[in-house]
Image (spheres, rainbow, N blue to C red):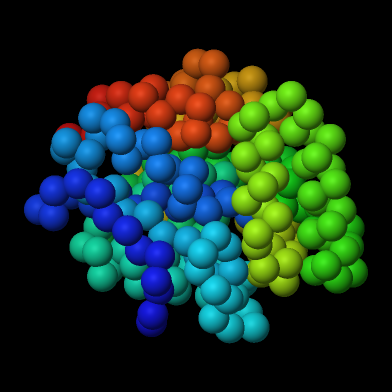
Amino acid sequence: MKLRTVRTVGESAAPGILCLAGFGDDSSMFELLTRTELVRRYRLVTVDLPGFGDEPTAAAGAGTLSYLGDVVRYVAESQGTNIFLAHSVASIVAVSAIEGVSSRGWTVLSLEGNLTAADAYFSGQAEEYESPEAFHTGFLARLEVLAHDDVVLARYRNHVARVDPAALWVLGREAAEYSRRVVPGEALMGAAEAIYLYNPENCPPASLGWLETSGMRKVELAGASHWAPVDAPELVAETILNLLP
């Protein structure tokens, strides 16, 4: 498998953390994190998934959870890491990559990842559209309104504008269907040691309720946006350093 966007920052012998961007985003969301104290103890591995960022779409099914899971597992294995920092819908992609491969002892640090169907508030919108192009146009228009006077959301919109519409549409529909078929948080806990990093202000009530009763380990990122590595990289780095050995 050829991927041109795999990048590592940190000592080559250090334990690796594979950073996975959320819906429509790319590895640039972790750029500020690579400039923190985190890289003194860990090697941060970033990659754009096919169809997103600077990684071209490699196959017609590039947006499917199965395909993306295969890509993520390949990168993890080739980079020798069993730790993921997975943002938003990327937590579902991480589960797709590691389910049934328990021998690796996976750890997933889920950055406001999908716990219930309520978390598919962006990706689930794909089911409202009959074509990738229509969804991409409609989604960008919604983000334009939300991004007014919000530099973090404006950054996100700019990166969504660059994606392959088909990969985005397929991933959105698959994430929504997956969330109806299983409880994403339960699947995550079944596949890995899961730790949830979140600001309660960003999360839907249904997912907060599930989190309180699930037994999943959790740590609050006070004041951070949904894109915490973008606007609160030092807080994210400090939190991870306190969590991992």
Compared to residue 35, the image places residue 220 above or below, namely above
The picture quadrant where one finds residue 37 is top left
* Residue 47: image location, x then y, percent: 41, 60
Compared to residue 111, the image places residue 100 above or below, namely below
For the question of whether residue 192 can be seen, the reply is no
Residue 187 or 176: which is nearer the viewer? Answer: 176
* Residue under the point 78% across and 41% down: 143
* Residue 122: image location, x then y, percent: 73, 46
The picture quadrant where one finds residue 191 is bottom left
Residue 34 or 59: which is nearer the viewer? Answer: 34
For the question of whether residue 141 can be seen, the reply is yes
Outermost residue, top side: 222
The picture quadrant where one finds residue 202 is top right
* Residue under the point 17% across and 36% down: 40
Compared to residue 61, the image places residue 73 above or below, namely above
Residue 226 or 178: which is nearer the viewer? Answer: 226
* Residue 180: image location, x then y, percent: 72, 56
* Residue under the point 65% across and 59% down: 162
* Residue 168: image location, x then y, percent: 69, 63
Which quadrant of the rendered structure holds the N terminus?
bottom left
Outermost residue, left side: 13
Compared to residue 192, the image places residue 69 above or below, namely below
* Residue under the point 70% across and 55% down: 161
| Number of marks in the rendered image | 0
Which quadrant of the rendered structure holds the C terminus?
top left
